[in-house]
Image: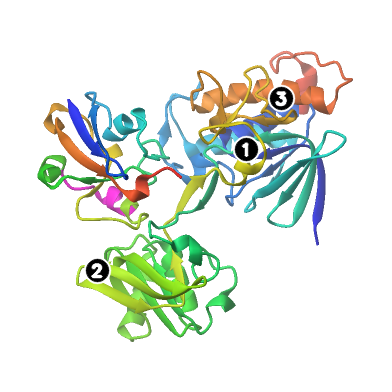
Amino acid sequence: MTTEITTDVVVIGAGPCGLFAAFELGLLDLKCHFIDILDRPGGQCAELYPEKPIYDIPGFPVVTGQQLTENLMAQIAPFAPEFHFNRMINTIEKQADGSFKLSTDADEVFHAKVVVIAAGGGSFQPKRPPVDGIEAFENTSVFYSVRKMDDFRGQDVVIVGGGDSALDWTLNLQPIVRSLTLVHRRAVFKAAPASVNKMQELVGEGKINFLTGQIAKLDGENGQINHVHLTTDAGDLSVPATRLLPFFGLTMKLGPVADWGLELNDNTIVVDTEKFETSVPGIFAIGDINYYPGKLKLILSGFHEAALMAQAAKKIVSPDERVVFQYTTSSTKLQKKLGVA
Amino acid sequence: MIIHVTDQAGENHELEGLEGWRVMEVIRDWGLNIKAECGGAMSCATCHVYVDKEWLDVVGAPSDEEEDMLDSVGDVRSNSRLCCQILCSDAIDGLKVTLAPSAAKD
């Protein structure tokens, strides 16, 4: 059943700029819901470099991506934004009253007066291995995740990769498949040592195969693969396969944003520098995903953009309210909202 | 100093490298087809290049961490490197690299 949620603002992307937007919007009494394809807040800071020190956040001589995320989460906690992880917005439709209807791939519909796209480099999606024609087999016999284990029951499965996803699914699927071949480019694994040991036991018992190599080519027809060709140190090999699971991690793709009718410039969204509004009034874009003359992809620029965007968003949500610009250092009204006065 | 880069389409480019820059930054700055999505944090492998055989010894082998990241692309060869880990200096003047398919932008 479709879940319907009505709010002032939907923020797409819970990276640092999106998170800070909840603060600026919160000071103006606007309620936010976040939607993010990852399973936790932080965006690139969480996914790409949680442990990397960042040196150019004003006021922090050094902070890691993870610490910055935690600090932002604490900073916006008084405004109790709501988070919806592991999902993606597929469509945005402007309604007759000027509001927006957003549909997710998790069967939810959001109704919001303002949409803020803070999606960084786009959405994190599984990396597609550079194999010619692989697209034709995707979602029929080539999968980048296991949604239903039953799709693999009795199949000849080839799993590629050396991380936790590859090893975990090797162990989980082995009991129900007809055959399973794990392929990795080297005999060194990043996955948890316990999983690697278990996998090696299964190889020893002859229950699965392990090959060092890389996928070179896929054979099949009508979306159904039948052979995976591998280049290995021992020469080229062909493995009969009805299912392929490549696990090469995530990469950022613009994704459905490209289809929302917004003016784009080389995979970024064109905005003005007064309100950071896109070519569609009521839809804003802040952080790495936007473009304007002089744009610098810095977290601090996204913070500035969030503050100006929030002022414009307030005028859309409460057109008749007179907004007085205030400082958190002196305004008891703002301090009450923050729970410190 | 000069870096010779062959792109995924087979076209050759002669780029001027600047001392202290990463080779990835030079290639990105020249607008070639390199995704380099993590910006040099060694957290992705989208600046993957093949180093010309005659330059392998000069450039050296990838670190363990770099090898780990190379696990996330499907087109690794014995001369694969992440070019965010190669620093420009006089020692690599004339370096020849080829952009891997997995380094391409979408």
Q: Quadrant of residue A99?
A: top right
Quote the CA–CA distance across marks 3 and 1: 18 Å
Q: Is residue A311 left or right of residue A239?
A: right
The residue identified by callout 2 is: A232
- Secondary structure beneath disc 1? helix
Q: Residue furthest right?
A: A320
Q: Residues within 10 Å of mark 3 (few under 14, many from 20)?
A: many
Disc 3 vs disc 1: which is toward the camera?
3
- Secondary structure beneath disc 3? helix
Q: Position of residue A181 (x, y in %)?
A: 37, 76
**Amino acid type at mark 1:** Met
**Amino acid type at mark 3:** Ala
Which chain hosts label 3? A
Q: Quadrant of residue B87?
A: top left
Task: Looking at the picture, tell me which residue is in the foreground, A6 or A98.
Answer: A98
Rendered residue at 42%/26% (across/down): A55
The residue identified by callout 1 is: A73
Q: Which mark is residue B29?
A: none
Which chain hosts label 1? A
Which chain hosts label 2? A
